[in-house]
Amino acid sequence: MADLNNRGYARNTGVAGTAYAVDEGLRAYMLRVYNYMAIGLAITGVAAMIVYALSVTSVESEAVARIGTTMLTNVGYAIFVSPLKWVVILAPLAMVFFLSFRVNSMSVSAAQMSFWVFSLLMGISLASIFLVYTQASIARVFFITAISFGGLSLWGYTTKRDLSGWGSFLMMGLIGIIVASVVNIFLQSSGMEWVISVAGVLIFAGLTAYDTQSIKEMYFSGDSQDVAGRKAIMGALRLYLDFINMFLMLLRLFGNRN
């Protein structure tokens, strides 16, 4: 009853009523961000599993190529072996740049559709993890990532500590990981891969909390529906990328290889 009375009072007073309205609006905005992100992850997961199922076969007469002991169909050959694989790998990155630079000039529905297309392309690109890791370990690492991400994002949302100072440090770390990963393509060092994966987990853990707080602070109650919608989509994209990258780094550390 006390809570209901307080809420009733908030609605009928100036500053308190405004604060209550902002709080309700912020919760709706963040829920929209998380819903977009969750749907994007679902699209990615379903797309990855469907593409993998279409790419492999247990019937030798249907196979056109092999990766290790895995027999590939025409679909698998096109995606994982042929030059088309570079399109599959680079298409999600191209969509990220497209959405980042064009979102402010797009309608909410167009931005939303672009995010779904990006999620689909990412799923096609990530189908290759099923060739490398067992399905049981992929599922296990996914749930570990989900629990870790949820805790970190909740902390970023609720903490009173200003995390804005983390931004430059985390970006430098991210650039360092990218450079080290490119170098390791040529070195093929398992030790270096382990260091990159551990550093990557820490950096994307930090980015999850940092981005959550940053997305929260982007909220403005005076935004139009279109502006708020575009902000929610870009927030979902940032958290989606944090989740996916943390998942891949953890998979390198704890995934059981086929």
Image (cartoon, grey):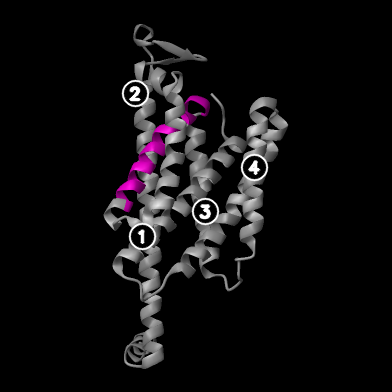
Q: How far apart are marks 3 and 1 (CA)?
A: 23 Å
Task: Return the residue nearer the eye: 11 or 185.
Answer: 185
Q: Name the residue under label 1.
A: 230
Q: Reply yes or no: does residue 130 show up in magenta.
A: yes
Residue under circle 4?
177
- Eyeballing the image, is 156 above or below 125? below
Residue 245 screen position, x and y as percent = 53, 44
Q: Mark 3 points at which residue?
A: 149
The x, y position of residue 117, in whole percent, is 34, 42
Q: Distance from label 3 to label 4 (Cα)?
A: 20 Å
- Between 136 and 154, which is closer to the camera in this rendering? 154
Q: Do the residues labelled 1 and 4 touch (CB within 8 Å)?
A: no
Residue on which the image places disc 2: 54
State which mark lies toward you, 3 or 1. Answer: 1
- Point out the tag, 3 or 1, that comes first from the N-terminus: 3
Q: How many marks?
A: 4
